[in-house]
Image (cartoon, rainbow, N blue to C red):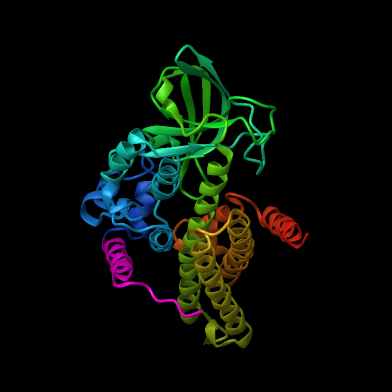
Amino acid sequence: MDFSYTETQTMLRDTLARYLSDRYDHETRMKVSRSDAGWSAATWKAFADELGILGAPFTEAQGGLGGGALENMIVMEELGSRLVVEPYLSTVVIGGGVLRATGGAAADDLIGRIIGGEVVTAFAYAEPHGRYDWADLKTTAKKDGAGWVLNGHKAVVRDAPHATHLIVSARTGGGQRDRDGVSLFLVEKGARGVSTRDYPTVDGGRASEVYFENASLPADALLGAEGAALPVIERVIDEATVAICAEATGVMRQLHLQTMDYAKQRKQFGRAISDFQVLQHRMVDMFMEVEQSVSLTLMATLKLEESDAERMKAVSAAKSRVGKACRFVGQSAIQIHGGMGMTDELAVGHYFKRATMIENQFGSIDHHLARYERLSFDAAA
């Protein structure tokens, strides 16, 4: 397949890559991730005002650049190459995706504020018991006059510590695992009845356990139709899954490049270890895994607008293969570096940690292989 990026897409990649190269090196990233805030509000504002990348996937009518999933893919790959901790995935890809899907004047207004860097969202969808079943919900929202009362617990809500708004899945009808009866709500993080327990993640990010105790929500907190949100959730999570596959390609490319550089410098028996054929073969295998991941991620991105079954198959094919690549490339990088590869001083250890987290984010290798198999059998039947 012959695919070429447009001039605008190439400019987007080059502009972001140049900015990150100049202002977001490893030392800067470490300083930001270990700060009390856990992210840089100044960098986020620069993404909005100087670069305009927070508007990359939104229409020009909404104030964006008129892009879509391909633009998200380009941005996420560059963010992955520098291990950027700012919440592009949570806010632009997921938050923006939900708001586009549900629509309405309030959603358009919030998208405008996301593009301007004023709003940061976090997606509270996972629960401790749910594994990868997005319909398995104990969190409930019950009508209370014109509004709603929300109760429940959401686990590992990435970027919640610095979010202004939470997008929350809750059951408004049906049984605990029914596909019908799932709704989405927009909740201000500072609302009464909302509490969080914040903590750092192993890959340098931040997350929260979020608790809702009789949180009172207005009627317009409901996003989209009541009880019909599961298809929206599934689609947005598929879009987010492809986005982290793109991030993974940036992460793995750096693992490969940094490993090659190290192998040229490290000497054993009077020779650079890059001269040893067995390590040359291993680094070629790493390169092949990266390139295959790039191709599968592009394929899945292009199939996001196809039927639900085709979209889900393409996403699962990409995620399962990228997950395996993350494991192989990451472990190979650490093996070639030796024990020092896991020290804080070397960036390669931090890339390895992010690659390991991506492997299981939004579904493990086994989960996506099983989903691909099920969808393939359903299509054959």
The foreground one among 276 and 179 is 179
Asked whether the viewer can see residue 193, the reply is yes
Asked whether the viewer can see residue 343, the reply is no
The foreground one among 34 and 221 is 221
Tell which residue pokes out farthest to the left in this image. Answer: 50
Which residue is painted at 51% across and 55% down in the image?
A: 354
Instruction: State whether residue 170 is above or below residue 36.
Output: above
Which residue is painted at 25% across and 46% down in the image?
A: 45
Task: Give the main secondary structure, helix, strand or loop, of the magenta stretch.
Answer: helix
Tell which residue pokes out farthest to the right in this image. Answer: 381
Residue 118 appears at what percent x and percent y?
28, 39
Instruction: State whether residue 229 is above or below residue 11.
Output: above
Residue 375 in the figure: left or right of residue 2: right
Quarter placement of the C terminus: bottom right
The foreground one among 46 and 100 is 100
Q: Quadrant of residue 79?
A: bottom left
Report how many numbered discs are placed on residues in the image.
Answer: 0
16 drawn magenta: yes
The foreground one among 17 and 179 is 179
Residue 334 appears at what percent x and percent y?
57, 66
Q: Quadrant of residue 284?
A: bottom right
Residue 336 in the figure: left or right of residue 160: right
249 drawn magenta: no
Q: Which residues are magenta?
A: 1-22
Residue 47 appears at what percent x and percent y?
28, 52
